[in-house]
Image (cartoon, rainbow, N blue to C red):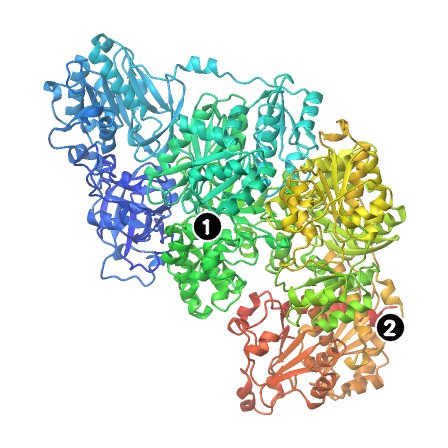
Amino acid sequence: MAATVYRPATAPIADAPCEGLVCLELEDGSAYQGYSFGAPKSIAGELVFQTGMVGYPESVTDPSYRGQILVITFPLVGNYGVPSRETVDDLLKDLPAYIESNQIHIAGLVTASYAGEDFSHFLATSSLGTWLKEQGIPAMYGVDTRALTKRIREKGSMLGRMLLQKEDLAVSAPSLGVPGDWKPHFETIEWVNPNEKNLVAEVSIKEPKLYKPDEATALKHPSGRNLRILCLDVGMKYNQLRCFIKRGVEVLVCPWDYDFSKEEYDGLFISNGPGDPQVLNTTVEHISAALQKNNTPIFGICLGHQLLARAAGAKTVKLKFGNRGHNIPCTSMVTGKCHITSQNHGYAVDATTLPTGWQELFINANDGSNEGIMHVDRPHFSVQFHPESTPGPRDTEFLFDVFIQTVAKCTADNTLLQKGVEFPGGTTEENERLHPRVDVKKVLVLGSGGLSIGQAGEFDYSGSQAIKALKEEGIYTVLINPNIATIQTSKGLADKVYFLPVNAEFVRKVIKYEQPDAIYCTFGGQTALSVGIQLKDEFEALGVKVLGTPIDTIITTEDRELFARSMESIGEKCAKSASASTVEEALNAVKDIGYPVIVRAAYALGGLGSGFANNEAELVDLCNKALAASPQVLVERSMKGWKEIEYEVVRDAQDNCITVCNMENFDPLGIHTGDSIVVAPSLTLSDEDYNMLRTTAVNVIRHLGVVGECNIQYALNPFSREYCIIEVNARLSRSSALASKATGYPLAFIAAKLGLGIPLKEIKNTVTKVTCACFEPSLDYVVVKMPRWDLKKFTRVSTQLGSSMKSVGEVMSIGRTFEEAIQKAIRAIDFHNLGFSESKTALMSVDDELQTPSDQRLFAIANAMHAGYTVDRIWELTKIDKWFLNKLKGLSNFAKDMTKLTANDVAGRPDLLLRAKQLGFCDRQLANFWDSNELAVRRMRLEAGITPFVKQIDTVAAEFPAFTNYLYLTYNASEHDVSFEDRGVMVLGSGVYRIGSSVEFDWCSVRAIRTLRESGFKTIMVNYNPETVSTDYDEADKLYFENINLETVLDVYQMEDATGVLGAMGGQTPNNIALPLSRAGVRVLGTSPEMIDSAENRYKFSRMLDRIGVDQPTWKELTSFEEAKAFCQKVSYPVLVRPSYVLSGAAMNTVYSEADLESYLQQAADVSPEHPVVITKYIENAKEIEMDAVAKDGKVVGHFISEHVENAGVHSGDATLILPPQDLEQATIQRIEEATRKIGAALNVTGPFNIQFIAKDNDIKVIECNVRASRSFPFVSKVMGVDLIEMATKAIMGLPFVEYPAIDRPSGGVGVKVPQFSFSRLSGADPVLGVEMASTGEVASFGVDKYEAYLKALMSTGFKVPKKNILLSIGSYKDKKEMLPSVAKLSEMGYKLFATAGTADFLQEHDIPVQFLEVLAKEDDQKSEYSLTQHLANNMIDLYINLPSNNRYRRPANYISKGYQTRRMAVDYQIPLVTNVKNAKILVEAIARYRDMEIGERDYQTSHTPLQLSGQLNFTLQDSLSRPHSFKKAHVLSVEQYTRADLHLLFTVAEEMRLSVQRGNGMDILKGRMLATLFYEPSTRTSASFEAAMKRLGGEVISVATQHSSVQKGETLQDTLRTLACYADAIVLRHPDESCVDVAKKYSPVPVVNAGNGSREHPTQAFLDLFTVREELGTVQGLTFTFVGDLRYGRPVHSLVYLLRHYSGVKVQLVSPKGLELPTDVRQQLVKAGQLLCESETLTPEILGKTDVLYCTRVQKERFTSEAEYEKVKGSYRIDNQTLKHAKSKMAIMHPLPRNEEVAEEVDFDQRAAYFRQMRYGLYCRMALLALVMSG
């Protein structure tokens, strides 16, 4: 077999000169090519890999690597440059400070990518490449180091040689490498095996040298001299020396072969070093002699350990590939503890050969190999790992103390030389006795409730993990979590789920009811923690043990002052701060700290109630708000601009402690970490920085006594090593979910086990299945997390980012380079984003945006770079590390270069295309640069063989084999990690959590996957949201952590050869790409994407409803204010206005008057033909009803109806839902069911769908229909005990199930779903409900009736039932009247009522006692007892009912009403607020009925019920076909015969035909009928489609080929027609003579269909063209048609132009060469109808820019008198990608076909190309036509 050659796997560094290629050849013949960045020379050596993520300057200078070619598995190298080599060490005087020896020892360096000269670190003085060149060491980047590591792992360490490209042989495209026979292009040298040499002799000191400690700290011998360690240097790292000197001993360093028996010393130390210990016999003999004498303690490290073992008589062996990394777990045989160590060796001690008296001291927790030995009764010991670290963790540095203490003790008492060394930390037995396993049978887990900003899906994910872990341990779990939308509260996870508020009162009740043994408070975010703190003193009495981190630790971490004091006690520093309980205290505190300061509320999640204050006024304002939310505020020094770094730390009960992941915020300190872009692992920290913070993290967590998982955040000064601890979260936090997904290490799962007292080393790594969980993951990729904001959903919200979190969700992306990962993340945030490129959206000035960040900051950086800002300038404004900015600048520059090229330029440059993909550019973005389209770029890419590679996330950087199915795609690689045999079903997830699409869709995805797996299907999950259960790698057979867009889904689908794609479960994200996927050849499972489009396109849907007789509110799309005004007058106000282009504020609005309409359309939105506005009649006081259903082949097989509490007009996502409905009449229900059945059938639904209805006086109308799972599916499934998703999945896959299965729920119970809002996070946002959704989550509870369920659910959102004072402000008279009985009830219950002026007067008139309050002017406001704002600010109000009068559409931001001001105050001061009259009424009734609530069987769910299946329902065409119409038994000769109503009928029947074809149903409408086709001119399409249409309708066809018929003998047309009429029921005729239609009309006794009469007409083509336009664009009205080509002879054009007169607002543009213009009479029709927009001989960008339908025709040779005439014009118009760059993104390109050159083939891949679909629509149209003409 030929050896494999791999081209470079990454893009070359931009703007850097190419230093030539290097080829790395391995012993097995494989060759990896890459780019040179070190010394230009070839070398050979032994190839080894190292899995550490930091520390390359230390590694390359480690003498243990002598003669080895080092492969670094972490892909990014060189980021922080190289520190000065000249700076000398304070301790070691003449040795360098920052590196491990005075030269680089490796033979060569191999990396995946390299930072070039764009390094960033305050200590860096040069790049890595510069230093390597200085020292003559070759290096290469561009190698798939993961693939290389796997090869070394499988075959063992092998020899390699790095061969430099020959200078005289240039390579045309370096990024493509040299394929095939590469050897002639590269130098050649001999192989070298360094292990055969005495490497130690090369690296050891040449003569003895003494190093002395500082006299002040020196340790003394009893005789008064310094304690002396003799160090045998067999390749010593300088840090070993530093570790001794700083501990106060002097060190005599001696050469490797030195006979030290004459020297005076107190302890013998043998250093690390390179090579095979067998070579060093001299050294072994010297050590052996010292062992015999036993005059001093002995300590060995690494090679020193192996030499000590050999001296004692043991043997050493060569390991397969050695241990080289910073995360290797070693268990102490003395204490039983597991330590994380840094290692670098290829040989090991064979423990089975240890002589008597010696025993193992440490063993490797992964592979069981020996890691240390000790003598039983002599002070001799050694370790295989590096306790001096550098690079790596410092956890075992205490061994130097152990050794020095032993030396000091032995000099004082030499009898101790007859004893073994004593190690701190107790014995294994003691430690296990002190920390036994916790014995529990039943555990209560507290969930986090509804998703809100600051506490979203990540807690849901961690809770689910915890329950999985408890179940695995056989423990019965009880969960309290009212979040009904999540998998956590589904059957099959916890044994019992209570849908109740997570608050002290209800948790106490559940504990008494369930009597669990233990409770977990750390998996439910801040909600659960707060409950734990409140109940801390009751748990013992309740018989409940708190698992995991003790509550006192939590209190310490939550109380800022206690925390600061605790940190001080171990010498760690927090930011300078003080706590205050009043504003005065805060003002005093600032005097000591100084501005700027940050103010935070204690006990608050996601930085709630926090902000920056630069002066006293800002401080007072912030303190007022924060003190309303919390009893205490913390004022601390602001370190804006410092780096923010986080570590996730895990600790078990036996004090084993590891850090699982560290993360660096892209944004500097000052933006809440939840609103920051975060990268993992950190990319700009050196080993010293990384491990300084890591060591601190471990010390802090040990000191606090955390058991389980926690997170620690730091601020790090980028210009020094100064750092502060910002906070510790002693619970699973947002970043824990991210860290779990980023590393593949399931933090919550492990934490739950640790809380049971199980030690880390006994838990398996769930990914490798062979190593233990006590290790720190090695990443060989980069992860970027990016927040998603939805601020435009709110009016008046501030978009500035600061210390309080505002994002509603986040995405995570994975790549092998930062560029690849960040571009993926940008695309994941929003479908419209293409990557890092300038954004056209209106931003404020770039400088402002960079300085005061908002949600647009990243785009501002892109715009700044595009505008020419330098990295330095942007850094000054943002303080974002220059390393990141340089990477982004590279992308910006590349994009600029790309826009200068076209697709044709790139077609011959696969290297450019490859480079673009390696930099993370998507096909859509490239298509934009090159004026092409996405699918054309894709095709070019596939032809060049450029496809992504699939890599695994395995936690160990490929060091061990992994059985993981956790995958991502990258272009920066050479091979796949996995094979593709599954042919699984792809399930598309829901993407980023945002308002309107959240955890409920994740529930749907997971339920679908579980159903598929239970049914024996292999599954593939695609999703990119780290907060979800669907992205757990144990949920699906394969998990692709990837974006859900056309390109990625196609890539995965094609690689996996998947059996189909299921998109109906993931909400709108997958629905948006269903049609393009289907058009690209993907098998989309479930309802056909064309039908989905029929439901989503308002025109198509509207027509369908008319067709099936279902009503909907009147609506119209309008293009000017005048039209809008006229429509509103016609339907009457109020109306709902939806602009397509919004300038500010929310998109939809309810408008109550013409004046409001005018100001809204002028101020907030643009109305024009380009930006039409849709206006719908708004029906007031109507009830809104939700229908969730499942159908199979159009037949409904299961459904549930829920009703909204609020009237229609509140977005359904913000509505309160009741199930089963309590107030609906049977008649209404029946009508809704009937309408649902009709819609299901018309759309031929298979799978889930949801319809929203409004009902008023039993009259129902449809608002919208979603052909997919909806937000309410989990709610209805859980309340009714019927899993609709399971049912839908089975229907889609054709599996058996039961239709309408038995409902499983307690009789008489009611479920109520209540929205969870996050207004308190969104400063400035007006907390009123409207047509735009504003809630971030939902909760649900159960009750005897709707009132009990509502109150429990409302309390679950954090609502507090009022104790005494209630404030009322009711706007409209109608609401006052409606509320009166409820207000009277409140008064009777003893509440003290306050009200604003109008409301107070009204209530007093009705004899209800009330105190009047008012919003007063500033100066009066402070003192007055009537001041409403004072009452709010002083927490004197327990409930505020503010019902704004609804005749206000949302006003622009500058208008502040008193109502808005007080509503906002209520939110800021945490006062429960109700703003909807229906909610207020149900709330009052609920409070009146349920002052005290007990819990019972209704509140929980357990166990599981299966589902099964049934029959078929059909709407018929009979009605359409049987009623009288113009087609029946009539000729179809000219378009002039037909009205718009005729067309409507034809198209309605065509829709039905399409349904039957899609269902695969045969039809027998024309059974027994015969059609004759008579063509006097050639035809493929028309003749074939009529034949197909006839046969599909059950009829037969005779086709007469005129060239072989009696026509040849001179038969006339009329005779032929009469003859055929004897055999057939209808004739299709095409004839070159225009007058043939007159003959047909006169002589044919059966209907004749004109299929073209010369160049005059082609009516059936015009019909199918119109049908195509309707299907593609929804409507024909208001469109601009551009006809291009031969308009003189193009008969389809003539017919179509005539039909367009039936549609209003249509404009036509004519483009044709001279001599082929539209015939005068046809042109006249256009002029007369006022439709002619322009005429031209060239197709200009302006004409294209206005075009909605581009209709191309063939210039036909047969129409010309001479060849020369034809040649002159034949190529006049060619539509290609270049032309189309000026066209609209939503338009249709049509062509009656056949084509020659008019439309380039590349356009076929454009989604806008409709000409092949046009043919399919033609079939449906012709079926309809034949059925109408011939049936009956």
Task: Where is residue 792? Give x, y as percent.
Answer: 61, 55
Task: Where is residue 860? Give x, y as percent.
Answer: 48, 58
Classify 10 Å Cα crowding around label 2: few (below 14), some (14-19), many (20 and above): some
| 406 left or right, relative to 1707 | left
Q: Residue 804 is drawn in which quadrant?
A: top right
Are discs 1 and 2 less than 8 Å apart at CB? Answer: no
Q: Residue furthest top?
A: 415
Task: Describe the element under mark 2 as helix, strand or loop.
Answer: loop
| Residue in front for this viewpoint, 1481 or 100 | 1481
Task: Describe the element under mark 1 as helix, strand or loop.
Answer: helix
Q: Which residue is mark 1?
A: 821
Residue 601 drawn above or below residue 469: below
Q: Amino acid at mark 1?
A: Ala
Task: Where is residue 588? Give x, y as percent.
Answer: 48, 37
| Residue in front for this viewpoint, 1797 or 879 | 879
Residue depicted at 47% across the width and 13% down the height:
433
Residue 127 drawn above or below residue 1603: above
Whichever of labels 1 and 2 marks the residue nearer the N terminus, that label is: 1
| Residue in front for this viewpoint, 1500 or 1642 | 1500
Q: Which residue is mark 2?
A: 1525
Residue 1437 seen in this snapshot: yes
Q: Amino acid at mark 2?
A: His
**Which quarter of the figure is the C terminus placed in?**
bottom right
Q: Residue 452 is drawn in which quadrant?
A: top right
Residue depicted at 22% across the width and 47% down the height:
137
Task: Where is residue 664? Give x, y as percent.
Answer: 43, 43
